Image (cartoon, rainbow, N blue to C red):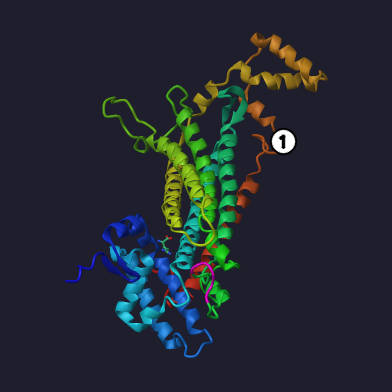
Amino acid sequence: MAPAQRGRQTTVGRISDEVLAFTTGRDLELDPRLAEVDCIGTAAHVMMLSRMPVRPPIFRPGDARRVIRVLGEILLQARRKGFVIALEDQDVHLAVERLLTARLGDLGKKVHTGRSRNDQVATDLRLFAKIELLEAMDETLELAEVLLACARTHAWVPMVGRTHLQPAMPSSVGLWASAQAESLLDDVIHLIDVYQLNDQCPLGAAASYGVPLPIDRELTSQLLGFSRPIHNVLYAINVRGKLETAILGALGQVMLSLARLAQDLILYSLPEFGCFSFPPEYGTGSSIMPQKNNPDVLELIRARSATVLSLQMNVAEIARSLPSGYNRDLQETKGPLFDGLAITRASVRIMTLLTRGVTVHPERLKAGFTPGVFATDRALELVASGMPFREAYQQVKERLGELETSDPAAALAAKTHLGAPAGLDWEGYAERVQAGRDFVQAERLEFHEAISQLMGLPYPPAN
Ligand code: ARG
């Protein structure tokens, strides 16, 4: 008697359940989120194949339209009900191919002509990252705007400026809040930078080395709304992992800004400081201490910033050790990318909510001004009357006890140079926010138009 066949039949041969479970890893959970972009990428590939000058044609134009119509239906279904991947599918790519073949027979069996899952997943991930990065930019700009509004409202509210956390010099809530906003505006530069790196199409690279077919890579790149194809097919595969490292780096920058903001808000809302406060529903209570309302949200943002930074290291460490050409190790960079995007975006959104809810307490802020905070200003007054700075410094230092608390408002008004409390360029900030918004809007529009045209349905579809 012939030995019973072991393992499970898959599109690519028989594979044992243990090996399938191990190698599929997090893909069963993560890949459904790629279903939509996988359908889109496949539509572009099929469209390109239908225009390929070979005899007999791989797809006649009418066939391509049929395949793309079914891809559109799968896309809509995935959006509505979610997408289920069976263990024997291994991943979203073979699951979509299975559905197409079930619906269209031979036409479904043709879609993978001249393509590999290696360039397919790289394309999916770039489409996915494109959509996510535009959202992340928008959300980051929103938070920057909320902080700028807070800064303008409280532009003249005095706040003790600190170095080494010790009281240092007169400052303002306006300076503090706009500093946080400017940090985020710089982060948007990082996001745009990685967005542009990401905006190149790997499709057509196939396994890593191209194929002996007249693949039109310019066409698929255009159909998918990418700015251009990645030129070298081997590089198109090699750069996976390295790109994710860059994207996570940009997200890490956003998280560093949030961590600073979170830490400041935790500190300045302590009862001992009382400079800022939040509506009670933004805190969490304690199970034992009735009086507590803890800033758990801010603490978790602080900790999750560490997570995102370490995800970048995780991916870089995977990419670091790989030889040229596709390696399955790359699959392990998918989770960190998804996690980094999700954590960062959720953190930015909740920080926006919290920042909108901040109440500023001017009396408590003013109460923090000790005479020492005015020591440097006093020395500079002496300089104004002709004394060399070091002498003025020495004189003030020797008579610290004689210093008096001055008017913080006057101290702020005197700092008029570029970027100082009375020299903040509100218009410059507003222009930077607007430029970011314009970028996001233009890119989104271009992408939506390309995909709507390719799929023959309005994209993004109304849910
Ligand atoms: N899930 C795989 C990944 O993310 C898809 C590509 C599989 N390619 C392969 N040659 N086994 O990398």
Mark 1, residue position:
417
Which residue occupies 47% across, 57% down? 132
Magenta includes 384?
Answer: no
Q: Where residue 385 sits: x, y (%)?
A: 81, 20
Q: Quadrant of the C terminus?
A: bottom left
Indicate left or right for 274 with 432 as reference: left
Q: Position of residue 342 (x, y in %)?
A: 42, 51
- Identified at 41% across, 52% down, the residue is 335
Residue 387 visible, this orientation:
yes
Is the CB atom of the residue marked by disc 1 within 8 angstroms of ligand 1's nearest atom?
Answer: no
Image position of 327 with respect to 111: above or below = above
Front in this rendered view, residue 113 or 387: 113
- Is 189 rendered above or below residue 117? above
Report the residue at 52% width, 36% height from top.
260
Left or right: residue 296 compared with residue 134:
left
Q: Residue furthest bottom?
A: 56
- The span shown in magenta is 207-211
The reply to whether residue 155 is in sight is no
Counting labels gives 1
- Place of residue 409 in the rendered image (x, y in percent of width and height, measured from the top left): 62, 27
Task: Identify residue type, mark 1.
Answer: His
